[in-house]
Image (spheres, coloured by chain):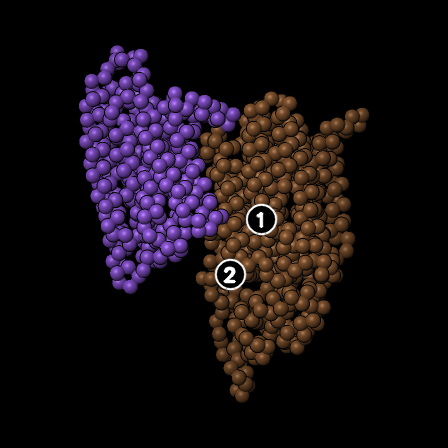
Chain colours: A brown, B purple
Amino acid sequence: VDQEAVERNLQPKIPGWGFALFLAVNAVSVWGGVFPFLPFEFQTVGVTLSFYTAQAGAALVAYALAAIGSFYNPDRTARALSWFAALPMVAGSIALLAAMYVGPAWSIALVVCAGILLGVGSTNMMLSWERAFAAMPGERGDALLVVGSGLSALIYLTLYLCPVAVTAYLVPLVFLPLCGAALTVTTRSVALNQSPLNDPPRHNPRVYRSFMHDYWRSSVAAGAVGFVAGITRAVGLADVTAAHVVNLTSMGGILASAAVILFLWRRCSFHLSMRKAFRWVFPALISTVAFIPFAGGTAYVDVFAGVVHMAYAFVQMILCVQCAQASRDRGLCPILTYSFCSGIMHVMNFAGFLCGWSTGLAEGLDLTRLALAALLAVWTLGISLYLVWMRRPTSSRRDPDAVQFIAFNQGSLRMQPQHHDATANTVFLYERADDDSPQLEIPIRPVLDRITKQCESLRLAYRLSDREAEVMELIVRGDTVARIAEKLNVSENTVRTHAKRIYTKLDVHSKQELHDLVQRFQPVDI
Amino acid sequence: VRGWQFALNDIGLAVFTTLAPAAALAYVVLACVILLGNLNDRERRCAESWLIVPLAVAAVGLIASATHLGTPSNALYVFVRVGASPLSTEVFWTIAFLGCSSLYWLACIYIGNLRSLKNLWLTASVVLSFAFLRSTSHAYAFPTVVSWNTPFAPIELCLCGIAAMAPLATFVLVCAGQGCKHRLVRCLELISAIAGLAACLCMLLQYVDLGTMHNAYGTAQDLVPLYPVAVAVFGVCCIAAVTATHRATSCLWQSLKSGGQATCATTAPEQTAQRRLLIACAIAYFGVFAVRVFFYCFHMTEGVV
């Protein structure tokens, strides 16, 4: 394995910087567009509420339309998205600026227009980036998503160095055109029309049903965090300074989580399951929410909002990587996969916002607003946990929706002569070069026999993903493409694509060569 | 102390007048290479993509100069007095130059090989860059500020820009795969060196002239007692920057002569040259910034003369 090539995946280059700029401008969907940089006196409750409702509603409609469009014609939908990638966001940001100069009567109308345009635009851009990253070979797309997310926090913090008078103008006039240009350059350099990512989903409904069955729980887990974030957003609506605190903490969270993931990724292989992560943070989350009514004052709510948005930013980043990996592993249309997962998450976030806002309208109850908001959040968290763990996904893999990160140094092997019968062909025992490096939990496929162990050895040596290892093992066992597709619940095109990638990674050109290579590997204990 | 207070108030403008003129001139140099250099399509695409560097440097200067605007709702009022106010005129031409050139850079990504249209557009941006330089250099011609309203102010600003131009222009040329244009690079170095010396002379004359302007507190010269030191620092920085540029390009050409070839994809010798040129840019800009800060120190209005 070429270690330098693996390390090069981390270089952001144009796609990484472009994506980072987009995320920074979008402020991780917390307060979209140029809103954080407008004067405090402009950000009244009415303006903020109108903007946020219009933006979130438009984003949900855009996700739904993108999902429907890509189900019937993914190619045309993707082209429609990329043609107008940055334009709605530019128009929305300008409309928001114009709202400052007109009277109150027109101001709300322009703010609503801005919300709709920014909601549609940010969805548009996000889907276009997701599609580009999913189409990139191997880990490049995942690395760019993580690196770009981390860089977005740095760019966002840099925006605060700009004079406040011009930042709002820089967004539509400089940053968004740059985002659009970066997206154009990126999409030109990636084979977007490759099969199976571009195959119409309606031709393989079974594959998509399987995907939805496996992934809706992790989306609900992400959505539960989004729901609590939405409630805190609504409760803090009138507190303009809280917006800056929340924005900064969420960007700090994304920077920290990207740094931690990259640190771990360089050192060890690991899987990240949103469902498991939700189970781990659930006790702390629900306890903190339950404490809200007793904390008193807004300081606790502001800090809590910051922490929750930090977690929400992390969840959004992982969701992007998860969907990109799912598209590659299962041969799915990235627009549909991301629309589905992100749609669930955004629906719950928006529902949280509406619930939080409606707590302010509730009269005649023996509960304070904070107590009512906390009660709603606790109920949603409990129900989400129930849904997430109600039934285990039926899949050959233990965590079919887990995100896989293969250690950068995996495959840097040393060869040792194997104590084997002398008549055999050249046989080596491959071992990890740094046996001391920590290993997080790695799901193990059912161990069948010697071939499984040999394939596991090969997987470690050549940095194959779990799905690639599965396909390789089935090829070695002599299964046909159709049979593999049936076993793994994917399309035949997906199996062929995986086979091509496996052959390229292993530098073999036929089934016989693959078989010979596997035979040269000594089984490992798994 | 009063002089430093003026300078600190206008530190954003000092950054702007340090960065933007040299960046605009570097942009002109690369634009001229694109227009007149007889480049093939690939070379031209590469050169066009690097136009973003001088534009970004100029844009950073412009953003820094906006610190005094207050809130976004005040920003557009700066255009109300274009033509009447030198500062409004300066902002207008700066936005016009940066807008036209940035749109050209963006258009290069989207439109194909429409050479005649692109040449026309690029020429327009070059013309606008000179309009920008003229308006910036005359932005301090306030009849009420006697210490700025002298012929020295615009000449000094232009000469400082030219003095800092060579390292940045050469850096951009090397990045764009045009670093092997020996004559052009040497010409730029010579022009910058001469402009640096001329700027030193101009600033010393200006210092003498400041001694003739006085009010109840003293002369304008008293506001900037260390101005000659700043001029000396500027002179040393100019010489160092030009020398560093010369050495960087000499080493690069030496490496290219022994088997290498200038490309848009950066090779190891080009990367080394780029690093050295960046240091040269930093030195040149430091020198210019030193004298620009002193320029804002000797702010003396007519009312107190």
- Look at the numbered disc 1 and give the secondary structure of its residue: helix
Q: Earlier in the sequence, mark 2 or mark 1?
A: 1
Rendered residue at 69%/36% (across/down): A353
Q: Residue A403: give x, y in percent of width and height.
A: 62, 56
Q: Mark 2 lies on which chain?
A: A
Q: Say whether residue A385 is visible.
A: yes
Query: Mark 2 highlights which residue?
Result: A408
Which of A462 and A27 lies nearest the eye of the viewer? A27
Residue A267 position (above or below residue A446) = above
Q: Residue A104: give x, y in percent of width and height.
A: 62, 22
Q: Say whether residue A142 is visible.
A: no
Q: Are marks 2 and 1 on the same chain?
A: yes
Q: In this view, does B243 lie to the left or right of A89?
A: left
Query: Mark 1 highlights which residue?
Result: A82
Rendered residue at 26%/30% (across/down): B156
Q: Residue A287: give x, y in percent of width and height.
A: 69, 40
Which of B276 and A51 lies nearest the eye of the viewer? A51
Graded by Cα atoms within 10 Å as few (under 14), some (14 to 19) or many (20 or more), the crowding at tag 2 reads many
Tell me the amino acid under the disc marked 1: Ser
Which of A475 and B182 lies nearest the eye of the viewer? B182
Q: Toward which corner of the image does residue B85 lie, by quadrant?
A: top left
